[in-house]
Image (cartoon, rainbow, N blue to C red):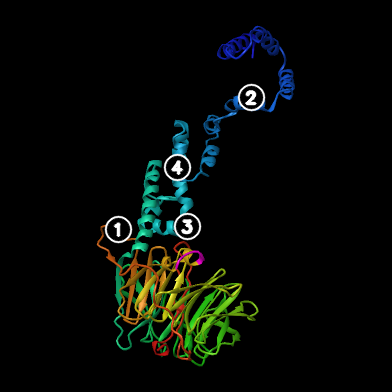
Amino acid sequence: MNPEQAESSTSLSLESASKELSQRYIDECSGCAQRFSSWSEEEQTHFVESLLQQMTHYQHGRVQAFLAPMLQRDFISALPARGLDHLAEKILAYLDAESLKSAELVCREWRRVVADGLLWKKLIELQVRSDNLWRGLAERKGWLQDLFRPQRGCQPKDNAYYRQLYPRILQDIERIENNWRSGKYRLHKIQCQSEASKGVYCLQYDEDKIVSGLRDNTIKVWDRRTFQCIKVLTGHSGSVLCLQYDENIIISGSSDSTVRVWDVHSGEALNTLYHHCEAVLHLRFAEGLMVTCSKDRSIAVWDMVSPKEITLRRVLVGHRAAVNVVDFDQRYIVSASGDRTIKVWHTTSCEFVRTLSGHKRGIACLQYRDRLVVSGSSDNSIRLWDIETGSCLRVLEGHEELVRCIRFDSKRIVSGAYDGKIKVWDLPAALDPRSSPAAMCVGTLVEHTGRVFRLQFDEFQIVSSSHDDTILVWDFLAEDDDGSETGGAAGGGGGGGGGGGDDDDDDKSGRGAAGKFNPVGGNFIAGGDEDDADVD
């Protein structure tokens, strides 16, 4: 600052503060400022530091308030001026939607950085990568093609398109959640038209197909778009009670006591495994390991090298009745039986860990993930368990007959029962000990005319099968005015309690759900069922 600037600045400051300052200070201040301006920067800094050391805490606060605005810098506007637009875009790309909207209002330069960097597009892409619901919406609504690398021949969209798309996505998500809560859906029905025995015991689906196991001894594959049967696999001599598939193979278990392996593309039979001496009620496979269970009360653990090279590793025994369901991950194998117990085994060593007891009758279905086990029983109840402690966290009551199938994700539990009803439960509420029982069940869906054998669901839909020989697809991405059907009796969880009495070997059923389809990666968890005659 030169002497002229110092004198001008000082005079302005004195004019604004003249009412609070003494005349002596006013007379001497101008000369001090001129002398200060004649020093070097180092000398000026040293002098100011000396002054600050002599000032009070209150004075320091006033100086800080005076300096704060002078130290602020609009670095977002400054970076592009230095050819660093990409840094400004990268910084703003960390903002959430509300913050990004606020950034656009700061000034024209910030708005330009947001627009040129397509930051709304990048925000949507981040959600699609990390959230299955967003990914599924992108695929179903068709705007996935406008993200990431646009397809050849597609006209690139500008920032305004993505800025308008974001709130529309939020509206779609809100509508889906409202449809789940209110029981509003579009219903698609597949009539399986079995010639002899009626009933669909197990299923699994992805975005292209539904694979189902039927009481008439066949596996039928259905096109998801036309709902027409595109393939029939024959070979079992008994009802197909359980199945699972991945990108290469289908593995099925049957009341004929065999496990069969099929090519998922051609339907060719690749292998038949003989071990169990009674019906194979359920199976699971993943990462080179398969676990099967049977009415013969045993659990078989298999090593899978290839579809044609599957060898028995270990047989687990301990249940006193048919083993109806198994699930596993890298830590534990979990099994449930008509003997009313859930047993936990180490996956690697196959050593027994603990027993979960509490159901009053045989257990028909369960799912296990992380620390949580959810089970359904012929005592009409659903129980939530902590697998590490063995404690029962919650009992859900509402079904009027045996709970045959159950699945859960991070938001909800979906169960199907012999009363023909599918119930949707609030999982976070069920895990909260403060929640009342009335808050648990958020909806009841009634469309099947027979026992519900199997269901599987994702963020948008439930796919279920029944003794009535149908597969129903309940689509919750229904538009407000698309003529969707509405489910029956959405409501609370009360009623229905469990049955007491002694259990017996006939009180059993197979696994209750074929698992959840992950729209992002196509990860499948399949399930199985036992023959209806074994449950009655």
> Dot 2: what SS?
helix
Q: Amino acid at mark 4?
A: Leu
Q: In this rendered view, identify the residue nearer to me: 232 or 355.
A: 355
How far across and how far down the image is residue 293, in percent? 52, 84
Q: Nearer the viewer, residue 386 or 60?
A: 60
321 inside magenta stretch: no
Residue 434 covered by magenta stretch:
yes
Q: Indicate left or right for 7 with 278 as reference.
A: right
Asked if one can make out residue 205 in the rendered structure from this viewpoint, the answer is no
Check residue 131 in the rendering and tell me which mark sits there, or answer none.
3
- Which is more N-terminal, label 2 or label 1? 2
Residue that carries the numbered disc 4 in the rendered image:
118
- The nearer-to-camera label among 2 and 4 is 2
Residue 181 is labelled as none
Q: Secondary structure at mark 3?
A: loop
Q: Which mark is residue 63?
A: 2
Residue 26 to residue 151: above or below: above
Residue 341 can be seen in this image: yes
| Residue 226 against residue 140 in the figure, above or below | below
Q: Which mark is residue 479?
A: 1
Mark 4 Cα shell of 10 Å, populated few (<14), some (14-19), many (≥20): many
Which of pointers 2 and 4 lies earlier in the amino acid sequence?
Answer: 2
Depth check, front residue: 234 or 43: 43
- Disc 4 versus disc 1: distance between alpha carbons? 29 Å
